[in-house]
Image (tube, grey):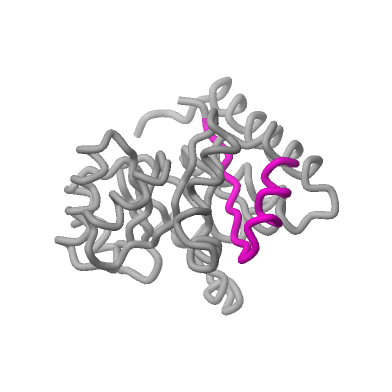
Amino acid sequence: MMIMLQLALDFIDLDEAMDVAKKAQNYVDLMEAGTPLIKSCGIRAVRALKDAFPNKKIVADMKIMDTGALEARLAANAGADIVTVMAAADINTVGEAINECRRLGKLIYVDTLGVSTDKIKEIERLAPDYICPHVGIDQQRKGIKLEDLIRQTNITIPMAVGGGINRLTAARFVEAGAKIIIVGNSITRASDVQGEAKRIKEIINAAEKGLQDNPKPTP
């Protein structure tokens, strides 16, 4: 499976988010309606992205904490291809969100923000499509590093990873086994959005080719 680049549109203004998405669209595989965007503009933000980019996978970063099936269905009905649920939610909520996405033919990420490795292993048994090791902005400010979190997250479920990734670090996460690299501010706040998206996509592709040419030995 090709390693994909996801653009996190963590804006509060939909027009600004759409403008950035249009500039980056040729170099990203997934468009994410970020949590701030959904909270500010409502579920219409998901619908607007799907209407504007029908050939892209749209991620609704709902960060579901309760009513797992209901909120997953809300996002799916608005056009989301992928929905996020928080690992910190009750295990029944996580399970309901996973089951509803399966029923609707959608994918789901389980975001590990703020949970222990024991909870992650419990969630792994529910077989979500992706587990998402994630270091939030407030955690980044405290010096918590995504690389350290991934080393502690020993899972067999495919990983989507996010939290401060940029052109200097993207290759590390490809080498760490991530299947989806989530990038926000380093693209969305760049002076040249299109150019930065292109550079990061090229870095991801080169790192993936390096893995294919020099595969790691099986333990």
Identify the residue at image location x=54%, y=22%.
212
- Residues 49 and 23: in front is 49
| Viewport quadrant of the C terminus | top left
19 in the magenta segment: yes
- Residues 118 and 132: in front is 132
Q: Where is residue 3 in the image (x, y as percent from the top left)?
A: 52, 32
Q: Position of residue 121 (x, y in %)?
A: 23, 55
Q: Locate residue 60 relative to residue 68 in the image: left or right.
A: right
Q: Seen from this angle, which residue lies furthest top?
A: 213
Above-or-below relation of 113 to 121: below
Q: Locate residue 191 relative to residue 159 in the image: left or right.
A: right
- Residues 217 and 107: in front is 107
Identify the residue at image location x=79%, y=55%.
190
Identify the residue at image location x=23%, y=58%.
68
Q: Position of residue 41 (x, y in %)?
A: 53, 63
Q: Seen from this angle, which residue lies furthest right?
A: 191
Q: Locate residue 17 relative to residue 77 in the image: left or right.
A: right
Asked which quadrant contains residue 15, the reply is bottom right
Q: Position of residue 182 (x, y in %)?
A: 55, 49
Above-or-below relation of 73 to 57: below
Q: Locate residue 50 relative to residue 77 in the image: left or right.
A: right
Asked which quadrant contains residue 49, the reply is top right
Above-or-below relation of 114 to 215: below
What range of the chain is rendered magenta? Answer: 3-23
49 in the magenta segment: no
Q: Seen from this angle, which residue lies furthest bottom?
A: 142
Q: Say if residue 145 shows up in the picture.
A: no
| Viewport quadrant of the N terminus | top left
